[in-house]
Image (cartoon, rainbow, N blue to C red):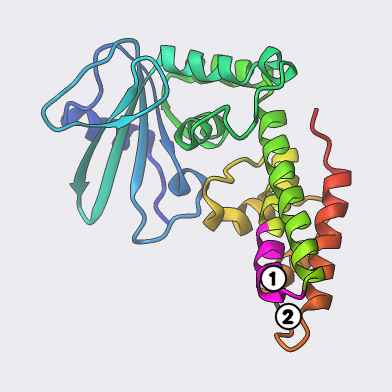
Amino acid sequence: MHEIDTADWLRLLRERELIPEDCLAVSVVGSVARGWHNDQSDFDIYVVTSNEAESAGQSSIAMPLNPPRVRTEMFYAGDRRWEVTYWLDSQYEQMLAKVSWDAFNRGVAPVRVLAPREELALSRLESCVVLHGAEWFEDRRAHLARTAFRAFLISRSLGAADDCVEDALGQMESGNLESATLSARAALGFAVDALLEGQGEFGSQSPKWRPQRFRAACPPALSFEDYWALETMRGYDPEDPRPWITEVLTICQEISMRVEVA
C-alpha cells in the first residue's frame, strides 16, 4: 500500500503548476484515500479554488452547476496515472443547497437531486485525505452534516429497492424466474446501499466498493458473512431459485423497515 505523505504529494502537484494561487483546499479522494487501492489504481486529487482557471492541458466535464463544468488534468508520475479535478468553492455551495432540508421537505425527487459526480464530491468530503485547507474541509463537513444529504440518498436507495422487490414478486408469480432473480439481485444492492448510507458510509455510485464499505460500516442489522453469501448467490439453485429469491426479498424488506430516513 502507498502511504500518503502530504508534503510529497503537494510538492509534486506544485512542481507541475497544478495548484492555482487562489487554491482553498486540496485532497486525495477515492480508493487511495480509503486504503482500498491496488498497484493499478489511479491517484485522484480534488482541488478547490475561488475562480475558474483553464490551462492547455485541461479537459472539461459537463456538470449541472454554474459554471456548468469541472476541469480535469491528467498526468503520469512513475507508473501511476494522476487525475486532478478542479472544483469551485461556489459549486460546493450549489451542491449543498440542492440537498437542503427545504428541498427535501418540498418533495424534490431523490433520484434527481444530484448528478453522480456531485454525489461523489459531497460523499468524499468525509472520506478524503486532506493535503491543504483543513479549515475549508471543517466548514464544509459541518455544512454537509446540517443538510438532508443522508436522507436524500437513503430515500433514493430504499425507493429503488422497493421498486425492484415489487418487480421480483410479480415476475416470480408469473413464473419468470430469470428476471425475478435479476430483480432480486438489484433489490439487494439498493437495500444494502441504504443500510450503509444509514451508517454514514456513502458511495453507492461505485458499487465495486460495496464490500469494503460494508466492512467499514459494520451495520448491526446484517452480518458481512450473511451479506456476502447473498451477494455471491451462494445458496442459489438454478433448478429451484424461488427459495433464494424469497430470502433476498425478505431481507430487503427487513432492511427497509430498519433504516430510518431522517
Can you name the residue that lies furthest to the left here?
Answer: 56
Q: Which residue is mark 1?
A: 181
> Which of 51/134 is in front?
51
Q: Position of residue 13 (x, y in %)?
A: 24, 32
> What SS does tag 1 mark?
helix
> Which of 232/31 is in front?
232
Which quadrant of the rendered structure holds the N terminus?
Answer: bottom left
Disc 2: CA contacts within 10 A as few (<14), some (14-19) or many (>=20): some
Disc 1: CA contacts within 10 A as few (<14), some (14-19) or many (>=20): many
Three-letter code, disc 2: Tyr
Spatial separation of the CA atoms under disc 2 and disc 1 = 9 Å
Three-letter code, disc 1: Thr
Are the two marked residues, 2 and 1, in contact with CB atoms closer than 8 angstroms? Answer: yes
Identify which residue is drawn at 70% across, 20% down: 104
Residue 236: mark in rendering? 2
Q: Position of residue 64 (x, y in %)?
A: 42, 24
